[in-house]
Amino acid sequence: MNHFSPSILSADFMQLQTTIDALKKGGADYLHIDVMDGVFVPSISFGMPVLSCVRHNTDLFLDVHLMIDNPQRYIEEFVKCGADLITFHYEAVEDVTATIEQIRKQGVKAGLSICPETPAKAVLPYLSQVDMILVMTVHPGFGGQTCIPECMDKISEIRQWIDEKHLTTDLEVDGGIKLDNVDQFLTRGANVIVAGSAAVKGNVEENARRFCEMMKQYSK
Ligand code: DX5
Ligand code: ZN
């Protein structure tokens, strides 16, 4: 099943409720929450208080993307604040399996993400352990970047492994996704699409509607 997961990172935070309501009205079923710590990535975004407020004001599925070093320190807290799915970075932990187990133990879904320089095969041993793989198509840390074309092959590669193993693991893509290139991600087999700047700037409801229409054309 396809899911549209707009990121609030580039939103006007004074208008967050209006933005989230418009995204939902346009058809988004997930909301992507980008948490940055200034260590794993250069910038600092927001954390628990914002997640908690969002949780109390929407029933959208909260897809939390942790771009933080040593995420194991904060998993329980993010769950308490309302995460439905927690994705951490392969590059940010020492023990991937232990981190997945820690997330699952909290009763939420677990995702594993790789940065552009990490090869697809890094996630292969964990495909059946996680609910979702997130392929970053920009260097994590900022919204509004251009997709790195070299990352595209990883999407097809991982989709092939998921299908060969008859798994239901979701495949999410994030970074530089716009209405005029989203088809390239969908044809390669991504089924969860993140869009930040292309979703929350301009007519938010219309943006979401157009992304969802594109995704319907590729639904399996
Ligand atoms: C980047 C974040 C993304 C970001 C995407 O580090 O993980 O989720 O919000 O923004 P766009 O779609 O503008 O590239
Ligand atoms: Zn993200």
Image (tube, rainbow, N blue to C red):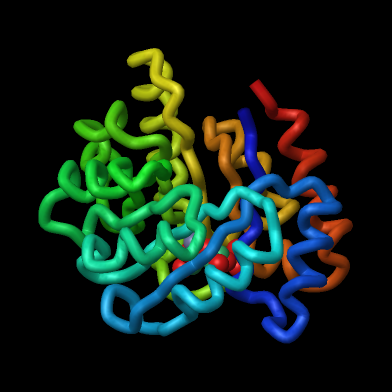
Q: Is 125 or 27 nearer to us in this picture?
A: 27
Across and down, in percent, residue 137 comes to: 46, 55
User: Which residue is pictured at 61% across the width and 72% down the height?
Assistant: 53
The quadrant the C terminus occupies is: top right
Q: Can you say whether 36 is above or below 96 in the image? A: below
Tell me if 81 is positioned left or right of 3 in this view. left
Give the number of marks: 0
**Residue drawn at the location 28% of the way across and 32% of the way down:** 129
Residue 144 visible within the image: no
Asked if residue 219 is positioned above or below residue 35 in the image, the reply reads: above
- The percent position of residue 179, horizontal first and vertical second, equals 74, 53
Task: Give whichever of 176, 49 is nearer the camera.
Answer: 49
Q: In x, y percent, where is residue 71?
A: 26, 64
- What residue sits 41% from the left and 42% below the top? 109
Q: Quadrant of the image for the N terminus?
A: top right
211 lies above or below 156 = below
Q: Quadrant of residue 62?
A: bottom right
Camera-side residue: 212 or 147?
A: 212
Q: Residue at x 77, y 39 (%)?
A: 214
Locate residue 155: give its quadrant. top left
| Observer-nearest of 65 and 158 | 65
Q: Is residue 141 at all visible to an observer of this figure?
A: yes
Residue 52, image x and y in percent? Answer: 54, 69
